[in-house]
Amino acid sequence: MIQHGFRNTTIDHCIFLKKFSDTNFIILSLYVDDMLIVGHNLSRIDRLKKEFSKFFVMKDLGLARQILDMYISHDREVKKLWLSQERYTEKVF
């Protein structure tokens, strides 16, 4: 990730950040063989995925709905994102 201009976050070593400006960035979460890419600019994300696919065998599952027992829902119109671990907490308790 470092070779592609990403920086490790100090909070979580599985989270990487690449800033292009204050409002344009890509956040990449990498945990074992699961990757989640978040950003404003879809063409930058597409270029990143094409570049990574040169080095890794990858499968694009499309819009994220779940990762690591976390369920993801969003409303692009109002620019809101919700994460839920309800099913995980039901398993634990």
Image: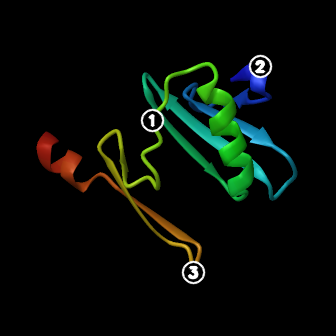
Residue receiving disc 2: 3
Query: In this view of the protein, which residue sits in the foreground, 58 or 24?
Result: 58
- The spot of residue 63 in percent (x, y) is 46, 56
Kindly identify the residue that appears in the image at 57 percent across and 80 percent down.
Answer: 78
- The spot of residue 29 in percent (x, y) is 54, 36
Kindly identify the residue that appears in the image at 42 percent across and 46 percent down.
Answer: 61
Labelled disc at residue 77: 3
Could you tell me how far apart the alpha carbons at marks 1 and 2 are, in whole angstroms? Answer: 21 Å
Determine if residue 11 is in view: yes
Could you tell me how far apart the alpha carbons at marks 3 and 2 are, in whole angstroms? Answer: 34 Å
Q: What is the three-letter code of the residue carrying label 2?
A: Gln
Residue receiving disc 1: 59
Counting residues from the start of the chain, the first of labels 3 and 2 encountered is 2
Query: Given the current orientation, which residue lies at the most extreme bottom position?
Result: 77
Task: Give the number of the mark in front: 3 or 1.
Answer: 1
Q: Dot 3, crowdedness within 10 Å: few (<14), some or many (≥20)? A: few
Q: Dot 2, crowdedness within 10 Å: few (<14), some or many (≥20)? A: few
Counting residues from the start of the chain, the first of labels 3 and 1 encountered is 1
| Image quadrant where residue 9 sits | top right
Kindly identify the residue that appears in the image at 85 percent across and 46 percent down.
Answer: 20
Q: What is the three-letter code of the residue carrying label 1?
A: Lys
Determine if residue 93 is in view: no
Counting residues from the start of the chain, the first of labels 1 and 2 encountered is 2
Give above or below for 36 relative to 21: above
